[in-house]
Image: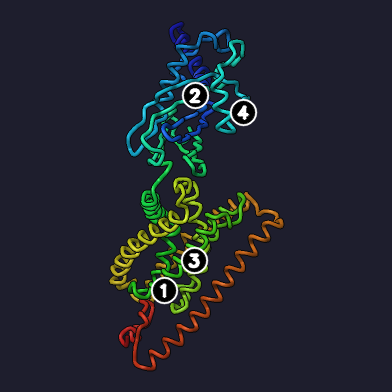
């Protein structure tokens, strides 16, 4: 083999062996930033702990493999400037600029950031020059103050620290407004500007949009709605069904937000499996022939399950509700309903076009479309059940029994009320029929002579 070829091969082998080491070194091991934002009558405070692993731009002097704290003044200034630019606070939409900034290096085992007072007390004391903090294994603890116009302003925050890491870089923010209870947030650079003290209308608007986005992106919920729609040819017949679905999923959504749902890793995959099962059931009911007058009852029961699914979609976003939790939940529901109505309008138009095709008209179209839906949902159900089997069902303790008993009682009350209402509705319809009124919408699955009579 020629010497030049050997040289290239050796260089390539060295590059392959060395590259993973460089990548592993460049990837930060600590990516969690811890912070407090406290509002006083005339100023705001940001107290923050940043892993040194994230501050590659700040070149702290070294003595061997430990930081030279005694000679780190210039590097500390550089690091504080970087953190001040990386974490931005706004007051009523205007960015605040730090008035003062102090910082120190801290050992990784220090636990002063368990409270605002202990963190502030630590930062007020300079680090001892002889403390040994190994490379990339400590923290930069910093305190910034900002002049503000009013403690009643709307404050927001954004982190850009380690933005290249995406959602891997997270910052915990404990917001401490004046004369109000503190609130905790977990944000990432991808979240953009996060409002820490939203007005009611800001929270409501944000959750309406979130509800619309969720229903438009939730394929299982959309397939469930499509399955409900297949036997109908007009929106009028769907009013009771959609109303029952809305009320039911609102109950479990709000209950979960207030901590009334079962907890544990098993419950989300259980809910996802149950949602797929609900689609399969509705599709099979369409195939064998659904009782459309009573369909709203079973839809309401399945709506309880879908409400748990909605709750997991918005669980991480509830932190942005501020003091408006119930309002935000209602706004999320409104967003879901807006999205549902838009989707139903499109689906009705699509179904109308499909029923114009001779091969899919009448009962045949209901069976074919429902079979396609059942096939898709069946595979979803099997895949999700495998996940549930891997997670495993929990052992039921006393607290779990209480939670299950509450939901069983609530479901029994809801079903009992629904059956009673359905009985009253049948009686009301019978009276109207006796007087010559016809209010029942005609499903596309009905025979042609029945549709003609209607």
Where's residue 333, x and y in %?
Answer: 42, 59
Question: Mark 2 or 1 closer to N-term?
Answer: 2
Q: Nearer the viewer, mark 2 or mark 1?
A: 2
Q: Circle 1 — which element?
A: helix
Where's residue 146, x and y in %?
Answer: 40, 29
Question: Mark 2 or 3 closer to N-term?
Answer: 2
Quadrant where the C terminus sits is: bottom left
Residue linked to disc 4 = 111
How far is the residue under mark 1 from the one under mark 4? 56 Å
Question: Mark 1 or 4 closer to N-term?
Answer: 4
Residue linked to disc 3 = 248
Q: Circle 3 — which element?
A: helix
Residue linked to disc 2 = 142
Q: Nearer the viewer, residue 115 or 42?
A: 42
How far is the residue under mark 3 from the one under mark 1? 12 Å
Q: Nearer the viewer, residue 248 or 359?
A: 248
- Callouts 2 and 4 close, C-beta under 8 Å: no
Q: Nearer the viewer, mark 3 or mark 4?
A: 4
Q: Nearer the viewer, mark 2 or mark 3?
A: 2
Question: Mark 3 or 4 closer to N-term?
Answer: 4
Residue linked to disc 1 = 240
In the displayed image of the protein, which residue is found farthest to the front?
Answer: 41
- Callouts 2 and 1 close, C-beta under 8 Å: no
The residue that appears at 48% across and 73% down in the rendered structure is 285
- Residue 18 against residue 184 in the figure, above or below: above
Where's residue 18, x and y in %?
Answer: 51, 17
- Callouts 3 and 4 close, C-beta under 8 Å: no
- Residue 132 against residue 210 in the figure, above or below: above
């Amino acid at each position: 083999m020629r010497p030049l070829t050997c040289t290239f091969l050796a260089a390539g082998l060295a590059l392959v062996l060395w590259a993973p080491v460089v990548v592993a070194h460049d990837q930060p091991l600590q990516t969690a930033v811890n912070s407090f934002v406290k509002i006083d009558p005339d100023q705001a405070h940001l107290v923050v702990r940043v892993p040194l692993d994230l501050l590659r731009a700040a070149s702290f002097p070294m003595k061997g493999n430990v930081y030279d704290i005694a000679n780190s003044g210039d590097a500390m200034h550089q690091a504080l400037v970087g953190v001040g630019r990386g974490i931005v606070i706004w007051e009523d939409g205007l960015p605040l600029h730090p008035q003062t900034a102090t910082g120190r290096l801290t050992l990784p085992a220090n636990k002063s950031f368990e409270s605002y007072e202990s963190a502030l007390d630590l930062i007020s004391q300079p680090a001892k020059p002889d403390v040994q903090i190994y490379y990339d294994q400590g923290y930069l603890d910093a305190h910034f103050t900002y002049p503000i116009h009013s403690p009643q302003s709307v404050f927001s925050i954004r982190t850009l620290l380690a933005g290249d890491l995406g959602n891997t870089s997270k910052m915990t923010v404990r917001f401490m407004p004046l004369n109000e209870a503190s609130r905790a947030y977990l944000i990432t650079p991808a979240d953009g500007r996060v409002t820490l003290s939203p007005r009611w209308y800001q929270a409501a608007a944000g959750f309406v949009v979130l509800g619309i986005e969720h229903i438009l992106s939730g394929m299982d919920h959309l397939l469930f709605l499509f399955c409900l729609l297949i036997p109908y040819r007009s929106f009028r017949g769907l009013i009771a069904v959609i109303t029952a679905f809305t009320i039911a999923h609102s109950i479990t959504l709000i209950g979960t937000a207030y901590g009334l749902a079962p907890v544990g890793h098993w419950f989300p995959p259980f809910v996802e499996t149950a949602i797929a099962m609900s689609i399969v059931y509705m599709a099979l009911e369409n195939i064998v022939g659904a009782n459309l007058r009573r369909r709203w009852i079973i839809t309401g029961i399945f709506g309880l399950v879908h409400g748990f699914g909605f709750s997991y979609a918005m669980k991480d976003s509830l932190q942005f509700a501020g003091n408006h939790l119930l309002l935000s939940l209602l706004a999320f529901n409104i967003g879901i309903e807006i999205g549902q109505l838009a989707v139903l309008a499109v689906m009705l138009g699509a179904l109308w076009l499909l029923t114009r095709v001779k091969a899919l008209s009448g009962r045949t179209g209901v069976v074919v479309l429902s079979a396609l839906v059942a096939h898709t949902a069946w595979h979803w159900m099997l895949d999700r059940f495998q996940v549930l089997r891997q997670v495993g069902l929990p052992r039921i303790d006393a607290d779990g029994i209480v939670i299950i008993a509450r939901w069983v009682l609530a479901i029994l009350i809801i079903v009992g009320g629904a059956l009673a209402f359905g009985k009253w509705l049948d009686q009301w319809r019978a009276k109207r029929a006796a007087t010559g009124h016809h209010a029942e919408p005609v499903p596309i699955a009905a025979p042609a002579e029945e549709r003609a009579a209607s």
